[in-house]
Amino acid sequence: MKYQQQTSEPGSDGTGRTLFDGIRRGKIWLGGLALAGLVLAGAVNAVYAGNPGPVESAAAKTAEQTASGQQEAGSAAPKNTDTQKTTGTSQKADAAGKTDASKQTDASKQTDAAGKTDASKQTDAAGKTDASKQTDAAGKTDASKQTDASKQTDAAGKTDASKQTDAAGKTDATGKNDGSKQTDTSKQTDASKQTDTSGKSEPSGDTGTPKAVEEKVQKYDFTLGFAGDICLGDNYIPMQHLAAIGSDDISDGIDPRYIEIMKGMDLMWINNEFVYSRRGEPLPTKAWTFCGDPDNVRYLKDLGVDIVGLANNHTFDFGEVSFMDTLETLEKAQIPYVGAGRDIKQAAAPVYLETNGFKIAYVAASRAEYTIYTPEATETEPGILWCYDYTRFLESIREAAENADYVIALPHWGVEHSTVLEDEQIYGAHAMIDAGADAVIGAHPHILQGIEYYEGKPILYSLGNFWFDDYDIDTLVAELHIKGEKTDKDSSLKKADIELKLYPGTQSGVYTALADTEEWKSNILQYLEGISVNVDIDDEGVVHGDSD
């Protein structure tokens, strides 16, 4: 071990003379031999006791240093030198084995002469190592004593050298220390257990685990409404009727009780089966064409309508110019439309509306014409979205399912004035639900068609006319009532209670009235149940599928 030399000059009284001066004068031969013997004996004892700390001269040791032991502040150096050199480049021991207080350089703490060490790297005299290495009295690394700092056990059976500390965070008489947790000698703990002085573990009364934050539960309750075909064309029966009686009040054509129900929906959809324009000409050879003044869009607001369907066989009745006017009229009125657009990207895109913190997606397409008058949009041309081949429509439904909480598919299909379902309707409805639709709401036949539940989800094959002509036909407004609770962990509608309720009525004499007697209401609901696939409809109009 390399010692530092004294730097004092010899004095007249001899107290500053070096050891070698004394030896040359022959005056302290016996004293030197005795001191060397003591140093040698101390080193031998330290080795046999398993003490890796520096050897101290008998004259330099105090009672306190004997009890607590000392360790050099730099004992955990980045690299170990050979057997003739100490570890670390910035620390040297003096002749007494003590660290020179002027050269103690732990990155965050200094070790004083009393043996206090870095809180995370203290080693006791009983054989505990610092966090990485053990250094013996000569500064050599003892390879047999290097252990993981988290797995050392002292002679008393106490474990976890990195977590046992006294209340001050300093090494106590047994050398236990933890830089991050402080305990007294009777409660040495790791993060979850307490170890008594005999080495036995007892469950801790307080593991330190944070209490789980109570989840916030938020109730939701909202309704989605749907009605069938409406025609506000000035060249056709409903609007001609209002003009004939000198009225501009929609309630002269539609029962105010129906209007109240529609306005009460959180989101209300209707099939807009005509165009808004003052331009264009009826398509040649097409039998039925409908066009209304753009000002008539106000009636949609009077009915509480939030979104309209344009994927039908009457949105191109007066040509492309009137089609474009229709889009612009609805946009100016801030009423979203679905299933049509200036190009295929817009026509095929799901439309998303929000209510009660949930995103509802609407996707619409048509397969209603045997003779095609209404074009499908292209990359450069306006039009609607077709579903004669369901491929593109199903892609839009899948896209909607990835981005919305609830998806509504709106096909325009079926045979007019027939309750018999086409095979393509049944196949298509099932495919839509398999693709991610939560409900399928159909239109076009101008009369009611049956209801089916598939995979627990409702299919209304046709809502029929709502206010479209002067035929005497049954109609209805459908309501999806969605309620439940959401939490921070589950904010979806997967566990929602979803109820389908019908408000039956009749369109007759250019007036659509809500059924207001038990017999009238019951007759419509029983008829509808009779043409449905697998549902029961109770007296309140609530539809129960097989899954119920």
Image: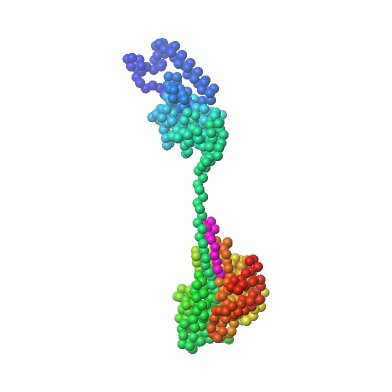
Q: Which residues are magenta?
A: 480-491
Residue 368 colored in magenta in the image: no
Q: What is the basis of the colouring in this image? A: rainbow
At x 65%, y 68%, the residue is 546
Compared to residue 233, the image places residue 144 above or below, namely above
Q: Is residue 127 visible?
A: yes
Q: Is residue 445 visible?
A: no
At x 46%, y 13%, the residue is 33
Could you tell me residue 190's position as x and y percent?
52, 38
Query: Which residue lies most toward the bottom here?
Result: 244
Could you tell me residue 221's position as x and y percent?
52, 65
Q: Nearer the viewer, residue 428 or 168?
A: 168
Q: Nearer the viewer, residue 316 or 310?
A: 310
At x 47%, y 34%, the residue is 184
Could you tell me residue 485's position as x and y percent?
53, 61
Query: Which residue lies most toward the front here?
Result: 518
Quadrant where the C terminus is found in the figure:
bottom right
Could you tell me residue 90's position as x and y percent?
43, 31
At x 51%, y 58%, the residue is 217
Query: Which residue lies most toward the left here?
Result: 12
Residue 485 colored in magenta in the image: yes
The total number of labels drawn is 0
